[in-house]
Image: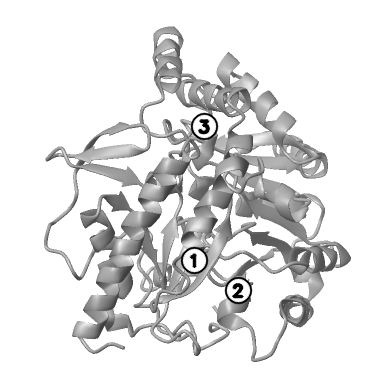
Amino acid sequence: MSPPQSTLWHQDVAHLVHPYSNLDAHTTRGPTVITRGDGCYVYDEHGRRFLEGMSGLWCASLGFSEKRLVQAATAQLDTLPYYHLFNHRSHPPGIALAQALTALAPAGLNHVLFANSGSEANDAAVKLVWYYNNALGRPKKKKIISRLYGYHGVTVASGSLTGLTHLHLDFDLPLPGILHTDCPSHYHFGQPGESEEAFAQRLADNLEQLILREGPDTVAAFIAEPINGSGGVIVPPAGYFERVQAILKKYDILFIVDEVICGFGRTGRLFGSEVFDLKPDMMTVAKGLSAAYQPISGLLLTDAIHDAMKDESRKHGVFAHGLTYAAHPVAAAVALEALAIYRERDIVGHVQAVSPHLFQRLRELEDHPLVGQVRGMGLLAAVEITADKSARRPFPTAAGIGAFIQGRAMEHGVIVRAVGNCIALCPPLISERAHLDELVDGLARAFDDGLAHARQHQLI
């Protein structure tokens, strides 16, 4: 993987909190055992209540006690607790979910391949890109370009796509043929005096030069999240995706859009693709698809990709890909009910209504000595931690300020997540203004604690 674009984010990656790490250098409490949930709150084994400001892992979009989803699962368990999609079999929830998803997806995505997680969906995208190009007689067109600080999962293939080096170290990743280009964060990687427009153009030029160096006949696909999630909630500058998509079209490169975090209302639109006018050839979804009440994901495809794969499968006598629990009937039934709730309760409209209040409150933190930037969209946000505002300089890795602030936030009753040099927020989509006030108030107190800690230890 090519090195990061700037010393603002260190070339060593020890400062990045592993997406699934429970380590906290500033607490000896041990693991927090969560025993129940209620709306936007969860409770630990001691009965202490926390406002869940991360929706678990970016996913519990309808909170933790939605009875309709429980009832959908129970009813399906009573009817058909399991069946598969192999050997020309199917079942009603799987069929209905495929129809519902393709009806909601961006234009042209008329087919869906189900799996159990976002990692698996992105893993399948890699396999199908290779399969598709073999079907078209293009055996060299196999390389896939991802981005630094993008997150696409942790399987062998999806972990290779992920542009976070600590997910590669000692796992022998990334795989050959997986390339990484620039992260679209103007805050971190913009050059002195460089406008966001010029920054977007520079990144597009860098992408095109990478394609030309590798050879356009060898580059098969480009994958991106509309807004980077676990890489730091990075919102790309205006014009970035417009320029990128023109380059992909120019060189006949497939565009895979990872909507695992951004999908189903998180950005204030049904999909992040709508925000940036993205035209995906493939799109992956998970997390909000079932509001996290069951593990399920999907990979949506265009007719062109589907038809080429179908022809290739006829040649071999089988489409030799599938998973035992793909479109599990219980998971599919729950996902269908989640989609119904999003529609009936106008969850997208609710996010549009309450998200300005979230960012109004977060902007109150911008004068805090430790806050470098507030960014995000919808109910997805990050507060950048800085040791020096003017220089945009992060704290040393060993200081562990992000982990300290995360731990102090829990002491103030809210769950947030330290991701690299920022604190990420991803509250349930059902959050009301009072929940968002509680979240920001707890976070503000945690930042004050972080400031006192930094001064005490002479870090600033």
> Mark 1 sits on what residue?
232
Badge 3 local density, few (<14 within 10 Å), some, or many (20+)?
many
Label 3: which secondary element: loop
Question: In the rendered view, would you say 129 is above or below 321?
Answer: below
Question: Foreground: 199 or 446?
Answer: 446
Circle 2 or circle 3, nearest the eye = 2
Q: Position of residue 282 (x, y in %)?
A: 70, 48
Check whether the beta carbons of the residues at disc 1 and disc 2 lie within 8 A of each other: yes
Label 1: which secondary element: loop
Question: Foreground: 7 or 295?
Answer: 7
Res. 248 mark: none
Q: Residue at 78% of width from left, 78% of height from top?
A: 201
Horizontal placement of 202 versus 232: left or right?
right
Res. 185 mark: 2
Q: Position of residue 253 (x, y in %)?
A: 78, 62
Q: Which callout, 1 or 3, points at the residue further toward the start of the chain?
A: 1
Badge 2 local density, few (<14 within 10 Å), some, or many (20+)?
some
What's under tag 1, amino acid-wise?
Answer: Gly
> Mark 3 sits on what residue?
326
User: Which quadrant is home to the N terminus?
Assistant: bottom right
Q: Which callout, 1 or 2, points at the residue further toward the start of the chain?
A: 2
Label 2: which secondary element: loop
Q: Position of residue 251 (x, y in %)?
A: 84, 67
Q: Which callout, 2 or 3, points at the residue further toward the start of the chain?
A: 2
Q: Residue at 64% of width from left, 89% of height from top?
A: 191
What's under tag 2, amino acid-wise?
Answer: Ser
Q: Distance between the Cα atoms at labels 1 and 2? A: 9 Å
Q: Residue at 71% of width from left, 80% of height from top?
A: 199
